[in-house]
Image (tube, grey):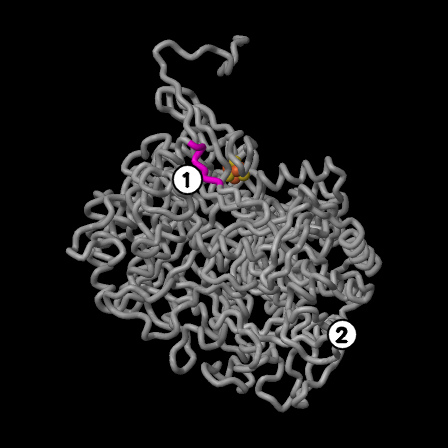
Amino acid sequence: MSDTPLHDPCRPPLVDSTTETRNTTCYMCACRCGIRVHLRNGEVRYIEGNPEHPLNQGVICAKGSSGIMKQYSPARLTKPLMRKPGSERGDGQFVEISWEEAYSILEQRLKKIRTIDPKQFALFTGRDQMQALTGLFARQFGTPNYAAHGGFCSVNMAAGMIYTIGGSFWEFGGPDLERAKLFVMIGTAEDHHSNPMKAALSRFKRNGGRFVSINPVRSGYSAIADEWVPIKPGTDGVLLLALIHELIRLGLYDREFLARYTNAGQLVNQDTHSDDLGMMLRNVQGDVVNPLRPANFYWWDRLTEQPVSDHAEGADPALLGHFTMPDGTPAVPAFQLLEERVKPYTPEWAEAITGIPADTIRRLAHEMGITARDQKIELPIAWTDSWGKRHASVTGNPVAFHAMRGLAAHSNGFQTIRSLSILMSLLGTIDRPGGFRHKAPYPRAVPPNARPPKGPQAVKPNTPLDGAPLGWPESPDDLFVDEQGKPVRIDKGFSWEHPLSAHGLMHNVITNAWRGDPYRIDTLLIFMANMAWNSTMNTSEVRKMLNDKREDGEYKIPFLVVCDAFQSEMTAFADLILPDTTYLERHDCMSMLDRPISEFDGPVDSVRIPVVAPKGECKPFQEVLVELAGRLKFPAFTHTDGTRKFRNYTDFIVNYETAPGSGIGFLAGWRGKGGEKSMRGEPNPKQWEMYEKNNCVFHYQMPVEYQYMRNWNRGYMEWAQKVGIRRDKDPIVIHIYSEFLQGFRRAAQGKRPGKQPPDHLRNRVETYFDPLPFYYAPLEEQATDTAKYPLNAITQRPMAMYHSWDSQNAWLRQIHAHNYLFVNPRTASSEGISDGGWMWVESQWGKVRCMCRYSEAVEPGTVWTWNAIGKSAGAWNLTPEANESQRGFLLNHLISEELPASTAGAFVSNSDPITGQAAWYDVRVRIYKAQDDEPKQSWPQFKAVPAAPGVQSVVPRWLAYFAGKGAGK
Ligand code: SF4
């Protein structure tokens, strides 16, 4: 064998070859790191992290560096396709068509729907990064039936925090690990905020910080924690409430912070005969601050022993006590109600439910409390608060938290995350050094100003919706229901079943559309979402629904359009396939109107620039939307004379403004005619080039006095209003007690005028819309025989693959080609299941056969597996014998998208009753050994689908990257 390496990186460039390096943004996961793509003769040779990018500063992960093999994946779709006449959905039989035919089919169909009833068209997207554009498309079309993946991802995390502190984790905020001394991570494995989190954790630990991870499984970040605290899934709220109990009992809360910056001192009406029971008392003589959100509250002043307007000069609000107003109304500060609420939530109570020893809970609470109290940070930064008080410095309490789907994906997740937000507030850590820090455009009002449409009248033929299809209800009158209180959206979002479903309920769209509940739709357009496999609960049944027909032979969901770059499980069910580009082939923007990549010190947005030409006939979905919007003559895309406003996506991004002359568009950098302005300014024709020259990033560093305490920082508020980040500049007071939730509860009790829940949902709304956090067992668990199904089953995403995106990636398949069920050896051996042996996992909904892997890194009452490694045979252009389908499995077959029938109805989503967050992690299972004579193959199995036209038909036995020869040998 020759000693010459196959590829010598030190070899001088080949004579006659052209080499170049281009900057763009990674999309091998949702993290959006900056990358440098090295090309030789126009072919991708190497991808590295961009050291000049603020997000990842040169760090790249296994996925990011394997982007080459995504580019040369054998599963790439390359041509628009129509289902072959006479073939059935799911058979994977297609014929090639031209883009003009595809456009014309869509144009005719959508034009007709828009003229008759726009909500017959539904657009739902997966983990895309263009929701400002897809949302605008839906709004202009006039359909409310739009959402992205948030409802089945982590809407509880967003809503639970935003309805409490006006911000959330990941894109919109995070832990300040530069200054924290104690870091507590809950329910997070390998997160979206991947590389920045890893780099920050490394620095944090080197600086002597203590890292505690609370998680049923010790993997990912938890593997490097100083202390792992195993917890039973779905009981995080119990732990958090017990920690709050302990902090209050010990007096280890930041009283000064609570009094000035939260509603802890605001007086709550306690008159049991009043319809306003539980609502804040309002001072009619007081300053409303903002008429759109009146804030004329009362404090009980400890100095004068009487009620005063909140934040009255010189007043000191009581946080505890019972008081009587001058008119005889009994009142208590909100904090008193919290104290009473958590009194029974003792560490012993929590131990019995979470499995965490009471002493550990007491120790953790004490550690959090004294770290916050005794290791205060003071920065010499003067600032002025919203009530006009000048502060000589910014102070902070160095306890930071981070949490994600482990808390969110339960039907009790919203109240759990309210508990977390309140714990963080008690410790005084909101937007302060060493604690939680916001990222622009957050903080936003509690709740943010966008509201969903208010009733069926909002949907009119050939007319855009008045506002965005999604929003943040503030009161029952903001719900999107008809006169009987029934849902108007196909996913039943913003209805009494899930009133605060700010991200929609994508996980119920197919089931609802199939059943015709609340109505039937005509066309469902799915972008980048694998709804026939890992993005759906109850996968086997949903696949049948996609194929189910009416008596007249028409499919129950008549027309299914799928846009994706790869031949996934979902594409086999499409009537029309639109081949998308990869992230290396297109323009894209991570916009301030959407989910930017802001830093703590100011807004940051970024772009993707194509580094190679699209493969085959692939087109970016953005181009498809802009083209269709022009053909359908949406007002925002058309001049008054009927001609198109935008040539293409890049032209749209440069020239679109949120309102005529607003100066606010998708990109905040290099605005103004010559690129001299930022945040706001006229369109700049050279804007893309300027981003490209600047590492594809625009970073606006705010003056340091605007960087902290932003909920109540007058200077920041004025700046944010000027640049269009905030509508108002009133303070964003933290809601320890949620008057908004109480408003819904009062409606359910029949004590509030306006929209009323249907009778069968009154009890549900009254129970769960509690203005103070509380614990209840997950809804599925309440409807499960837990003696029969004693174990919790959960999934998580591995570091080396992002959901289902990477099973076609030859390099990453070498890390994960099949998955095991990880079981604590005590649990497995008690069932006679051996390490590596075949076993069954069964829930009340279904069962799967898989292989067992012993693991001490999981608490004994939980089993878990990697998400989406198991594949359907033939999907992703894997051979039917590939390990992914023969040894890999999908836990989703065990999960239901609906709950068993109850007083709340027969077809209620298996979701959080407040937000509609999919309750993926609530499923209960039992395990048992597979018989020795059973096939050594995972189950269920599905018929293999052939490669679609335009997809590489002969799959090489092995794949490798050979420069200059493409992929595959
Ligand atoms: S963390 Fe995500 S965005 Fe960053 S390099 Fe890895 S795959 Fe790419």
Amino acid carrying label 1: it is Val
Q: Which residue is tagged 2?
A: 303
The span from disc 2 to disc 1 (Cα, nearest Å) is 55 Å
Q: Is residue 619 left or right of residue 308?
A: left
Instruction: Give the left or right position of residue 763, taking residue 672 as reference.
Output: right
Residue segment shown in magenta: 694-699
Residue found at x 39% / y 19% = 19
Residue 361, image x, y percentages: 79, 58
- Where 337 sits versus 808, above or below? below
Residue 834 seen anywhere in this rendered image of the structure: no
Q: Nearer the viewer, residue 116 or 901?
A: 116
Q: Nearer the viewer, residue 831 or 695?
A: 695
View extreme (left): residue: 641
* Residue in view at x 73 percent, y 35 percent: 206
Looking at the rendered image, the quarter that the C terminus falls into is top left
Labelled disc at residue 128: none
The reply to whether discs 2 and 1 touch (Cβ–Cβ < 8 Å) is no
Residue 916 in the image: x percent, y percent?
51, 66
In the image, 413 versus 550, the foreground residue is 413
- Tag 2: amino acid: Leu
Instruction: Describe the element under mark 1 as helix, strand or loop.
Output: strand
How many residues crowd around disc 1 within 10 Å: few (fewer than 14), some, or many (20 or more)? many
In the image, residue 347 lies at what x, y percent?
Answer: 80, 64
Mark 2 vs ligand 1: CB below 8 Å:
no
